[in-house]
Image (spheres, helix red, strand yellow):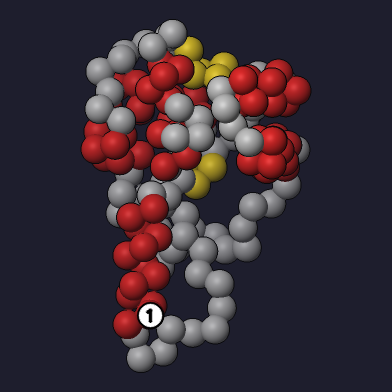
Amino acid sequence: MENFAKGLDFAGQAASGTFATPFRADRPLPMVSAEDVGRRAAELLMSDDPGDHVQELLGARDYTMAEATAAMSEATGRAGVRYQQVPLKDARVGMLAAGMSESFADAVLETARSFNDNEPWGREKRTARNTTTTTLEQWARQHLS
């Protein structure tokens, strides 16, 4: 979720009435807050048996980018911000113009490409163990307003 605040600059883009990224508008994806990740890491580090496997966290629920835009728009009092998918090459130009490093822009674009091509992103199905508590709406009210 923190990527919406810094790397993707939701607040700055929302001022124009449009939030644009290279991610498909219609494919749901898990969104998790850094606070939830930190909380789970602390729980595992403090447990008697932290395990020896990767712990996937999927956030409170999956959101499409269109749903995420609507949720953040409402939470920040900027009702009506619309989502727009932009081509990868146009997104790269915009990210570099906004001051993003080439390596970070390329990493975002590779993530978007894999997402848009329906590549699998995780190994686990959603369960009580990998579902965290913070919703995007809660996070946005706290971090974007």
Q: Is residue 68 above or below residue 86?
A: below
Q: Quadrant of the N terminus?
A: top left
Q: Residue at x 62, y 20 (%)?
A: 97
Closer to the camera in the image, 96 or 131: 96
Q: Residue furthest top?
A: 16
Report whether 93 appears left or right of 73: right
Q: Is residue 47 above or below residue 36?
A: below
Q: Give residue 44's quadrant in the image.
A: bottom left
- Front-lying residue, 38 or 74: 38
Could you tell me which secondary element the residue under label 1 belongs to? helix
Above or below, comparing residue 45 to residue 19 in the picture: below
> Residue drawn 63% across and 36% down?
101
Amino acid type at mark 1? Leu
Q: Nearer the viewer, residue 76 or 91?
A: 91
| Residue 135 horizontal/vertical position (percent) | 32, 44
Left or right? Give the position of 68 relative to 39: right
Q: Nearer the viewer, residue 133 or 92?
A: 92
The residue at the point 40 percent across, 34 percent down is 5
Residue tagged 1: 45
Residue 127: x %, y % from top left? 44, 63
Position of residue 37 in the picture relative to residue 21 (left or right): left
